[in-house]
Amino acid sequence: MLKFLRYATRLVVADTPPDLDLSAHPNDAFFKTIFSDPQHAIAFFKNHLPSDIAKRIDWPSLAVIPTSFVQSGLRQIHSDLLFSVTIEGHLTLLYLLFEHQSTVDPAMPLRLFGYIGEILSQHHKAHSLPLPPVLPFVFHQGPDAWNISTAFEDLFALPPDSSAQLLPFLPKFQYALLDLSRYQPASQEQDAQLKIILQLMKLAREQQILEFFKWLASTFSRQISDALLRKVLIYALHSDSDLDVGQIFSSLSSNPELGKRTMSVAEKLIAKGEAKGEARGISKGLWIGKILTVQEFLGRKTSDPLSLENLSLAELEKHYSLLHQEYEMRFKKV
């Protein structure tokens, strides 16, 4: 079965910031696309920061600071975002580090110490003193449970009889943590949109993306916005190279309304990509992608892609038009 991803690669460009490469780093791109949205960032921090801190933050003041402290070559294992908020009128920075490498990093507090030092150094150069507090938060998507200390001081080996005297000389901080390996978004997350996002990220790491769509079909329909559905589809297709749109539609079969909305979003993605296509070969690929997508959704046997590639653009357009008429009659004319 031809993978829709082959024809959809160019379709993600308009939905993703230009410095993010979904094909190379889907986790990094999805994380930054989702949590750069203040709505999702606020829901995340509200639900996962300690409640005595979350209730003191002026959430409408949250803003994304466009910077990163993770080198581009390391995006395959971790990403980061920096936010500013106010607490009782005072500037506070929230530093969110997204960790998606396969093993737990025992030196995480040391790495955070370096990033926090850079954040404060940049702030000092730009604004002088006083410095704002930086609250570090680690969001872990890896398969292993995060079973290490979150306190920086626990990295040190101190003489037992002298630890009390030495501790005041050591930097002291800890980081907040969300460990997806131990968290069940479907039952524990309160925000509906964030529940969908975290459930997808959890099951993507477990290589169970089709199980995510089955869960989505049984749980949500109107609660997921078209904008989020679009990002979910793009991330899913890039996270699993063996996944195609036909399998997704099959997983959504118990929810016809969500299936129709998914089809509509897929068509819009293709149309958007087509509008940006400059070469004839790209245009043909987009029409072939549209034909195969509709065939998948209609439950028909998909055409041989090589035979489609031999057709002219006019023939491909006509072929798609006939399929689209069948789709309209079956799903949209009630």
Image (spheres, rainbow, N blue to C red):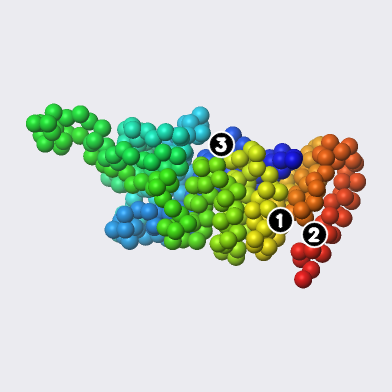
Q: Earlier in the sequence, mark 1 or mark 3?
A: 3
State which quadrant residue 26 falls in.
Answer: top right
Mark seen at residue 327 = 2
Residue 312 is left or right of residue 87, and the answer is right
Residue sitting at 46 percent across and 35 percent down? 101
Give the mark toward the camera: 2 or 3: 2
Q: Earlier in the sequence, mark 1 or mark 2?
A: 1
Residue 259, x across and y down, in percent? 68, 59
**How busy is the neighbourhood of tag 3: few (under 14 within 10 Å), some, or many (20 plus)?**
some
Task: Please name the amino acid that badge 1 sits on.
Answer: Met
Q: Is residue 54 shown above or below 240?
A: below
Q: Earlier in the sequence, mark 2 or mark 3?
A: 3
Residue sitting at 83 percent across and 44 percent down? 303
**How busy is the neighbourhood of tag 2: few (under 14 within 10 Å), some, or many (20 plus)?**
some
Which of these two is toward me, 128 or 209? 209
Mark seen at residue 25 = 3
Task: Please name the amino acid that badge 3 sits on.
Answer: His
Asked whether the beta carbons under mark 2 and mark 3 sit within 8 Å of each other, the answer is no
Q: Secondary structure at mark 3?
A: loop
The alpha-carbon separation of the residues under discs 1 and 2 comes to 10 Å
Residue sitting at 48 percent across and 31 percent down? 74
Residue 35, x across and y down, in percent? 49, 49
The alpha-carbon separation of the residues under discs 1 and 3 comes to 25 Å
Residue 247, x across and y down, in percent? 67, 48
The alpha-carbon separation of the residues under discs 2 and 3 comes to 34 Å
Residue 66, x across and y down, in percent? 48, 44
Residue sitting at 76 percent across and 42 percent down? 277
Asked whether the beta carbons under mark 1 and mark 2 sit within 8 Å of each other, the answer is yes
Q: Secondary structure at mark 2?
A: helix
The residue that disc 1 covers is 263
